[in-house]
Amino acid sequence: MRGRIIKWLTVAVTIFLALAMAHADAQAKSGGANCTSTSGTIMNTGTDGSECSADAVASTGSKAIAKAVGDSLATSAANVNSTASASAKTDAAAVAEAETNSKATAKATNTGTSGAGAEAVAIDGSKTKATASGPGTSAIASAETSASATATAKNTGSTFGAEALAVDGATSKATATGANSFALAEIPDSGGGKATSTATNGGKAEAEIPSGGGGDVVATAKDLGTAEALVEAGTANVEASGSGSVAAAEIADGVGKATASGGAEAAAGTGAKCQATANASGIGGEALAGCEHAGSVVTANATKGSIASGSDTSAPVCTPKNGGTAKVTSPMGNCP
């Protein structure tokens, strides 16, 4: 996903620079560059080295706004009753595109202009907002067909950032804050749903509804933890905190929850409309909870590096360690 962000922004900036150089009558503004268009293309160059381009297709009721300050690049394009707004400050790049009753907003500050910045694309009754700040940071928000996507990234550094994608009435929100943080919220297929990912202080969070089953998925990663959740239908909530901590859920239906801290791993999975919950803490700790039969409820808890595993198809396993506890409740039995 990150590679797609870099590739798109690099291409956008290259095209923008080519257009700017070819536009012989670009007007110099005092300081930054400002462009506002309700019909046709407007391109300006500021005395501070900033450049902007705004393109609103004539007679479609659209508006394109682009503002750039401090050696920055901003470009916007709007078509068919849409509004696109791009703002770039202090050596940054911002791109906004809106089409067919949509609204796109991109804001970038001090990101650099090579492979970083903010991009927002909204199509067919959708709304997007992308905000990026800090060197090398990228945010991309893309929505189509009455969907909503918001991506916010701050001081993540290069190769990281935030990406939100939604289609067909879905809502996605990705927020990444702090060095080496990455957040992905993605709903690429029809069927709706809501995906939310939050990554802070080097965390990696991914929340996905890949095949249009709807549902609600939340992934939260803190302090170098990794949280990954995938929902076909139903709901999932995963949270990981601390270096080496991993929380994961793969939900076909029903409800799944996984929480990991202090270097532990927790995973929850469902194959039917059932409920699986896994909680683990401590280095080397493991909690696994899974269910395959409708109506089942399985819970696995492990502390201080202990191991707990439960399902509705096999006997539970509990291995307490380091003075911690291991506990499982399931249709196949409980332990200890």
Image (tube, rainbow, N blue to C red):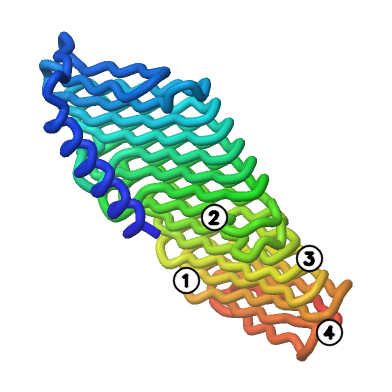
**What residue is disc 3 on?**
254
Judging depth in this view, the residue of 69 and 96 nearest the camera is 96
Q: Amino acid at mark 4?
A: Gly
Q: Relative to the observer, which residue lies in front, 336 or 148?
A: 148
Q: Check disc 2: other Cα within 10 Å, few if <14, some if 14-19, many if 20+.
A: many
| CA distance for labels 3 and 4 | 21 Å
Of callouts 1 and 2, which one flags the residue occurring earlier in the amino acid sequence? 2
Indicate which disc, 3 or 4, sits on the residue closer to the N terminus: 3
- Which three-letter amino acid code belongs to the residue tagged 3? Gly
Q: Which of label 1 and label 3 is nearer to you?
A: 3
Q: Which residue is mark 1?
A: 283
Element under label 3? loop
Q: Position of residue 122 (x, y in %)?
A: 51, 39
Ranked by sequence position, the earlier of labels 1 and 3 is 3
Q: CA distance from mark 1 to mark 3?
A: 29 Å
Residue at figure coordinates x 57%, y 60% from the top left: 208
Residue at 31% across / 40% down in the picture? 155
Query: Marks 1/2: CA distance?
Result: 30 Å
Q: Earlier in the sequence, mark 1 or mark 4?
A: 1
**Image mark for residue 333:** 4
| Left/right of residue 50 with respect to residue 131 in the rendered view | left
Q: Amino acid at mark 2?
A: Glu
Q: Nearer the viewer, mark 3 or mark 4?
A: 3
Quarter of the image with the C terminus is bottom right
Q: Amino acid at mark 1?
A: Ile
Residue where numbered disc 2 is placed: 186
Q: Quadrant of the N terminus?
A: bottom left
